[in-house]
Image (spheres, coloured by chain):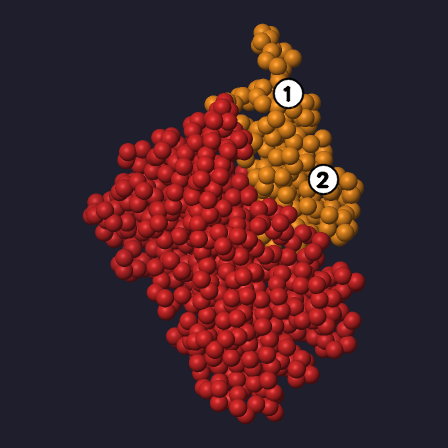
Chain colours: A orange, B red
């Protein structure tokens, strides 16, 4: 198979340096990876086919619908629209990386659970990433801010996602005060 | 040690002692040999598939409950297990839900379905579960109580259960986990233990979020597309634009030159098989080591296709054909219903109202595109299939492989939307054929353009109505003429039953108007068609509920008054084929939405208010919608929906289904249409086929559920039919434009 195995995290204490294959170094969910394959390969297929991080979903060839959103340096980005070649030294966060290292959910994830903002669940990772991006930019998003989310959902979760974003914003504000 | 208790004539609950002291209650086919069926290997360990059981209680207190029916977003993976958990008195906090996959055993070469019918998204999971799943929980609970009685030396009838514990009158408590091993050794009773009386329900009627919510928000729920066989290759297809066309030229050299592209394979439909059981259209598959390579390979193919007879088809021409049929004197294909004498009633007319409605072709547009992961060898087939009907998937696999019934393992993880698309299994046939051709485990993957351009579409349709209203404002006669291409054509249904996918025998206002006629005219089309969510209610409710609003307008009265007069006094209106509509329940949902949206302001409000109601298989639904217009900008200000579905199993889940189906219906109505030109579908991505964005949809859907005691009724598509007409009626109030053609936005902007 033409895949590059997920490289282990680099530790400075490693004594024997492995022969360095040229590649693209990036961080995914806080871990270091080196992609040594085709730099044209979209991030989506690297995540799904190579790393088997399957939380990020395929929506369409051009990323419409937002199921394939990930955070690249904190900004919501279509994973099928960005080739690996453009990701050198970038920080990528996928839905699998939203909870903290101990598995404690981000307030946004908890809000999606509390509002039951889930239909079939297939597009939910994309909604979470888009909402996270919004909350990074707007601590207290208005309805018209929420209206700008690009995601599509046939199950009709939009009203519950709206409530979840507002709930998360409120809970993050409280968390910041505490 | 094992024993069994009757569940139904053909299936028996079975008790099995698992390893490490687990109690298992499941089923096996009644025809299985007298000796115990071997415990599936997976059941012994942690693997989640192949369990073949409904309940497993482990020594550590974990309760594992199997979900029988596929969950396409309908919430059955939560609500079905909660029905079992309630009877079991399990602590829901420690319940884990697993999808069961297909339960099939070998009965002399014929399949025996272990769990009875297994189907999702067709509205009958809940009624079936209510009839039989409670028994599994009740039996497990009975066994645990017997085990506790022995250990505590207290008679079983003095013990009670709560949150996975058996509690003795003297205060002693035993956890289910402690009792599981002993309970598994107790012989089940001759007769199934009685199920609970409603006053003892602890979970039924209480709100619960999705059982898999935590896994979903952390990206841990695997869909079929997320399953892996280590050595699987990936196939991506290019289908012929015409289902009856053929390959005219193929140069695969460039595709095969890509390193990692393994093979290019041609597929053809089997003309002897009905749609949904064979390849949907001639196709060329590129098989490669990864999805990315296969997609590149598909792009590199040099392909040309030749149209078949369908190359002349246009949706515009079909609509014209429908209109001229309806305007002609030709006899209908089927006179579906003919109460009283429509023609005689017409002669003493006080007032006539007439209107024609046009609705477009639609795609299923599921979020998770068609895919299937398959591993074949001489004696087994293992497949991950996003299917609403695992038994139908099994049929397709069996025909192509010739394997014995129980050699086929169909696993059904959570599914990214169904809407009827996954009742057909063309993609399963493709996956199996390709895996056979390359002799390797294989993942079939349809990119979005294939998914939208190769579907079993919903036919466009034209409804023409004539109503006669007498001087007392009663609708004396209702004549409905509908033309459409049946979803059932070619599917083994006799020609006099093809109307059943297009119009309902008992749909409103049948039974409420003394002279009522419903005629169906068949359109001939080669565009593939198949089952769709809420069929045939959605198209009919839009036309009927819009037309009632037009009658109200003709009578210069409040449309709620027109509806209430039409429905009449509280009574039971018998349905043809059995059952009855309870008019009190129908009026109740109408009044609930009217009150909530302040219908009394209907005349004065600057915004437009619209209302509609419908009846679906024992359930009642009404919508009220408030819209505003600023220039060409339509804003849906408020949506209220009231439903009466009998007993509510999970109020939170129900609310989600009702709000979700309402939004889906609005999205369909606002924007969506499939058009076909020269036999080719014109829409191939979300830009051409624009599901409504967050901004276009209302900010909330206010859901009112009527408490009920009757047996629960499926609700996954209940809220679809009345949403669109309520919207169109509201648009009429605010803009004076009567939208008789969908999609609504396009028509509204044309007429403004």
Task: Identify the disc placed on residue B409.
Answer: none
Residue B628 in the image, given as x and y percentages of width and height: 75, 65
Q: Secondary structure at mark 2?
A: helix
Relative image position of residue B540 (x, y in whole percent): 53, 69
Report whether residue B360 is seen.
yes
- In the image, which disc is placed on residue A24? 1
Residue where numbered disc 2 is placed: A133
Q: Residue at x 53, y 21 (%)?
A: A5
- Residue A55: x and y, percent? 57, 37
**Dot 1 and dot 2 residues touching (CB under 8 Å):** no
For label 1, the SS is strand
Quarter-of-image position of residue B745: bottom right
Q: Is residue B78 above or below residue B61?
A: below
In the rendering, at what x and y percent does residue B230 appear?
A: 44, 28
- Front residue of A115/B615: it is B615
Which residue lies at the image location 40% right of the left edge and 51% below the top edge? B276
Marks 1 and 2, Cα distance to the nearest angstrom?
A: 25 Å
Considering depth in this image, is A39 or B703 the residue closer to the camera? A39
Mark 2 falls within which chain? Answer: A
Residue under the point 58% across and 10% down: A18
Q: Is residue B598 left or right of residue B328?
A: right
Q: Quadrant of the N terminus of chain B?
A: top left
Quadrant position of residue B233? top left
Let me know if marks 1 and 2 both belong to one chain.
yes
Q: Is residue A168 left or right of residue B451?
A: right
For label 2, the crowd category at 10 Å Cα-Cα, with few meaning under 14, some 14 to 19 and many 20 or more, is: some
The residue at 42%/67% (across/down) is B500
Which quadrant does the C terminus of chain B fall into?
A: bottom right
Q: Is residue B589 visible?
A: no
**In-front residue for pair A158/B531:** B531
- Mark 1 or mark 2: whose residue is earlier in sequence: 1
Query: In the rendered structure, the residue with mark 1 lies on which chain?
Result: A
């Amino acid at each position: 198979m033409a895949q590059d195995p997920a490289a282990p995290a680099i530790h400075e204490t490693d004594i024997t340096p492995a022969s360095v294959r040229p590649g693209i170094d990036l961080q995914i969910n806080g871990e270091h990876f080196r992609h040594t394959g085709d730099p044209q390969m979209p991030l989506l297929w690297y995540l799904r086919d190579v790393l088997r991080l399957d939380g990020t979903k395929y929506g369409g060839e051009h990323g419409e619908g937002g199921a394939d959103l990930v955070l690249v340096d904190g900004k919501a980005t279509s994973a099928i629209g960005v080739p690996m070649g453009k990701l050198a030294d970038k920080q990528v966060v996928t839905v699998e990386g939203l909870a903290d290292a101990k598995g404690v959910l981000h307030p946004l994830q908890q809000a999606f659970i509390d509002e039951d903002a889930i239909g079939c669940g297939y597009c939910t990772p994309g909604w979470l990433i888009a909402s996270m991006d919004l909350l990074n930019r707007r601590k207290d998003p208005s309805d018209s801010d929420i209206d700008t989310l690009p995601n599509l959902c046939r199950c009709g979760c939009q009203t519950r996602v709206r409530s979840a974003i507002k709930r998360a914003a409120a809970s993050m504000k409280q968390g910041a005060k505490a | 040690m094992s024993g069994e208790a009757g569940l139904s004539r053909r299936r028996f609950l079975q008790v099995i002692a698992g390893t490490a002291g687990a109690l298992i209650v499941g089923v096996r086919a009644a025809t299985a040999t007298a000796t115990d069926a071997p415990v599936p290997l997976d059941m012994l360990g942690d693997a989640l598939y192949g369990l073949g059981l409904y309940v497993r209680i482990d020594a550590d207190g974990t309760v594992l409950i199997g979900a029988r029916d596929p969950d396409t977003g309908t919430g059955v993976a939560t609500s079905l297990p909660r029905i079992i958990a309630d009877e079991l008195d399990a602590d829901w906090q420690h319940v884990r839900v697993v999808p069961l996959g297909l339960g099939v055993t070998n009965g002399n070469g014929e399949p025996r379905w272990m769990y009875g019918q297994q189907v999702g998204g067709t509205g009958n999971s809940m009624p079936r579960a209510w009839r039989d799943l409670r028994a599994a929980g009740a039996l497990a609970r009975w066994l645990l109580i017997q085990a506790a009685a022995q250990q505590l030396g207290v008679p079983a009838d003095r013990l009670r259960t709560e949150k996975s514990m058996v509690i003795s009158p003297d205060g002693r408590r035993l956890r289910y986990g402690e009792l599981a091993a002993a309970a598994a050794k107790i012989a089940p009773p001759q007769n199934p233990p009685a199920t609970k009386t409603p006053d003892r329900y602890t979970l039924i009627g209480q709100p619960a979020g999705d059982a898999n919510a935590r896994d979903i928000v952390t990206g841990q729920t695997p869909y079929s597309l997320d399953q892996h066989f280590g050595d699987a290759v990936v196939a991506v297809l290019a289908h012929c634009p015409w289902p009856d066309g053929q390959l005219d030229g193929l140069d695969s050299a460039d595709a095969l030159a890509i390193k990692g592209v393994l093979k290019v394979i041609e597929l053809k439909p089997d003309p002897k098989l009905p749609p949904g059981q064979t390849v949907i259209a001639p196709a060329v598959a590129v098989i490669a080591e990864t999805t990315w390579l296969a997609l590149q390979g598909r792009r590199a193919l040099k392909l040309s296709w030749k149209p078949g007879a369908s190359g002349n088809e246009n949706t515009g021409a079909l609509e014209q054909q429908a209109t001229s049929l309806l305007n002609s004197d030709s006899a209908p294909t089927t006179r579906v219903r003919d109460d009283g004498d429509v023609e005689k009633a017409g002669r003493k007319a006080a007032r006539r109202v007439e209107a024609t409605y046009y609705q477009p072709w639609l795609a299923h547009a599921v979020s998770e595109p068609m895919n299937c992961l398959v591993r074949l060898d001489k004696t087994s087939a293992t497949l991950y299939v996003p299917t609403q009907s695992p038994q139908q998937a099994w049929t397709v696999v069996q025909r192509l492989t010739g394997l014995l019934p129980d050699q086929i393992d169909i696993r059904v993880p959570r599914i990214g939307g169904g809407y009827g698309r996954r009742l057909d299994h063309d993609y399963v046939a493709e996956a199996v054929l390709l895996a056979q051709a390359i002799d390797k485990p294989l993942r079939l993957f349809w990119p979005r353009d294939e998914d939208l351009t190769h579907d079993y579409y919903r036919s466009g349709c034209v409804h023409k109505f004539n109503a006669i209203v007498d001087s007392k404002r009663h609708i004396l006669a209702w004549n409905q003429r509908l033309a459409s291409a049946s979803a059932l054509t070619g599917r083994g249904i006799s020609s006099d039953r093809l109307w059943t996918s297009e119009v309902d025998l008992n749909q409103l206002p049948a039974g409420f108007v003394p002279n009522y006629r419903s005629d169906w005219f068949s359109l001939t089309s080669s565009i593939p068609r198949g089952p769709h969510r809420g069929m045939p209610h959605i198209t009919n409710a839009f036309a009927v509920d819009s037309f009632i609003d037009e009658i109200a307008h003709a009578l210069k009265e409040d449309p709620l008054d027109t509806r209430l007069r039409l429905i009449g006094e509280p009574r039971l209106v018998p349905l043809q084929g059995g059952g009855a509509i309870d008019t009190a329940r129908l009026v109740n949902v109408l009044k609930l939405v009217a009150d909530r949206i302040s219908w009394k302001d209907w005349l004065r409000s600057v915004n437009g208010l619209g209302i509609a109601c419908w009846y679906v298989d024992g359930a009642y639904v009404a919508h009220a919608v408030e819209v505003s217009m600023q220039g060409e900008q339509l804003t849906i200000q408020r949506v209220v929906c009231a439903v009466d579905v009998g007993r509510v199993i999970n109020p939170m889940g129900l609310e989600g289904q009702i709000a979700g189906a309402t939004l889906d219906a609005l999205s369909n109505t606002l924007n969506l249409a499939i058009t076909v030109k020269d036999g080719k579908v014109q829409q191939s991505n979300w830009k051409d086929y624009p599901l409504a964005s967050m901004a276009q949809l209302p900010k909330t859907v206010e859901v009112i559920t009527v408490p009920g005691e009757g047996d629960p009724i499926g609700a996954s598509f209940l809220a679809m039919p009345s949403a669109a007409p309520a919207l169109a009626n509201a648009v009429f109030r605010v803009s004076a434009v009567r939208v008789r053609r969908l999609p609504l936005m396009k028509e509204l902007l044309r007429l403004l």
